[in-house]
Amino acid sequence: MKKMLILLITLIIINLSFFSGCNEEKKIVDTDGDGYEDKFDAFPYDPTEWIDTDNDGIGDNSDDQNDKTSNFIFIEGKGSYSTIQEAINSASINDTIFISKGIYFENINITKSINIMPNSKDFIDMDNEYCAHNYHPIPVVISKANGVWVYDPEGRKYLDCLSAYSSQNTGHCHPEIIAALKEQADTVTLTSRAFHNSLMGPFLKMLAEVVGPHINDKGSGIMSLPMNTGTEAVSTGLKVARAWGYIKKKIPKNEAKIIVCRNNFHGRTITIAGFSSDISAVRYYGNFGPYTPGFIIIPYGDAEELENVILETGPEKIAAFLFEPIQGEAGVNVPPEGFLTRVREICTKYNILMVLDEIQTGFCRTGEFFACDHENVKPDMLLLGKALGGGVYPVSAVVTTKEIVGPDVIKPGTHGSTFGGNPLACAVAMKSIDIHLRENLAERAKEMGIYFIKRLKEVSEKRTKIPIKEIRGKGLLMAIEFTEDARKIVEELKDNGILAKDTHSTTIRFAPPLVITREEIDWAIDVIEKVIIQ
């Protein structure tokens, strides 16, 4: 009995000791204060082991380069960098950045490779290295676009105020045009003119119905010749005019003349370069000579001089008068009111073809479907391009009458183009025409153009860095002419989010997509004012 009593007392004492111990606070011994108990710490008296100066995952006591991470971020052949961003900024196309982060306590090295996409500088460098230097572009790279906005590889956003020289009337990547392009691309894209295709006929019929009412048709009917680029349309128009002159007007062979205007821009083929008055760029100081004969240059907008030259040369030798209703590349030169009307009268009087190059002004750009509509004038031939392709595909056409381009003038084999009238081009062009009409872009260009020019003139009344000589334009084809070189202003506009282009050094052209809104114009005006005001 006594033994049992002693055992019971002993158990009680043990239990009391156990529960008493449970209530005691657990003591953690961490001599160096690094967050690890001494019994689990390999270096219990060294607080530097988990100080990580360079944040590379290795404690300073085990890191022989604890003041930098250069041994963990590098590009082969170029060296090491202290941060990933520095390496990215230095990387070029096809470079790989290697990031090696050591984790000391697991003794594991994790290496991650990052393939760097080319940046704007890389693309510009490649252009300069591999492309002939026939352009002097604004230093910006466009890698994405939608509506009136474009973006560079770094994600910077710009308002496009050039529209690929008026090719993007409907806005970049219009969803209906892209859909038409994709749908046709899955069906048939190219057949050549050796065979018929199922879309060229409908396309040319649409041109006859939509463009025909703007042509001086005396009853023979509308007929077109499809091509690809604008300069091809001009070259085709010149051939047709000469052939008509010899075959229909009975001009003596090799004596036909075509009158053009000073400061014209109709393209850059060898013949067109010959009748340009741009000595430095288009004619290239004679380095493209000898030039094609048969062209007479007169001042732009001078109907009296036109008639004088016709009479001096002899009306019987003049086949055509080729000109732009507004000279775009020359700096948006708008002719005097009534000029087109007077030209129509003179051409009719002397049986001379009135040929209008509406490649840049056509399809609603100036606030009318064609610029000649401002004076209700109908030319004998319209040369079309740019916006006809919806900003996604090169499509051009000569639209005239059967009297001028019919089978008794242009016979099989006398002119051609492998891609002209191809199904893909026709599908895109028909959708582009449809959108211009359905979205009433002529009226929109007229309304937005009036507002844009009004706001530009308000800015011009303030003191500017470079004096402004004139603000001019029609619809959404506008220009600011300065008294001095304006290239620096164009580049400052780019730096502030607007893409425009200088022409003939002193003039900046503004031609945004016709879908631009009033709010976007207000934003643009704020930027323009910020850049040009002193």
Image (cartoon, grey):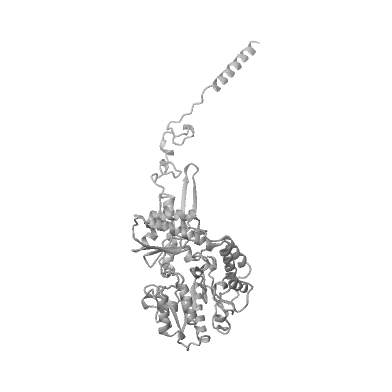
Which quarter of the rendering shows the C terminus?
bottom left
> Residue 168: where, in percent of width, then height?
51, 64
Left or right: residue 402 compared with residue 271: right
> Residue 294: where, in percent of width, then height?
43, 83
Residue 399 position (above or below residue 391): below
Q: Quadrant of residue 91?
A: bottom left
> Residue 22: where, in percent of width, then height?
55, 22
How many badges with numbers are in the image?
0
> Residue 365: where, in percent of width, then height?
50, 65
Residue 89 position (above or below residue 247): above
Which quarter of the rendering shows the N terminus?
top right
Q: Nearer the viewer, residue 375 or 316?
A: 375
Residue 182 position (above or below residue 353): above
Q: Nearer the viewer, residue 188 or 461?
A: 461
The residue at the point 37 percent across, 73 percent down is 280
Left or right: residue 18 compared with residue 469: right
Q: Nearer the viewer, residue 16 or 334?
A: 334
The residue at the point 49 percent across, 26 percent down is 27
Q: Nearer the viewer, residue 136 or 239?
A: 239
Q: Residue 352: in sight, yes or no?
A: no
Residue 70 position (above or below residue 355): above
Q: Residue 19: in sight, yes or no?
A: yes
Residue farthest along the top direction in this orientation: 2
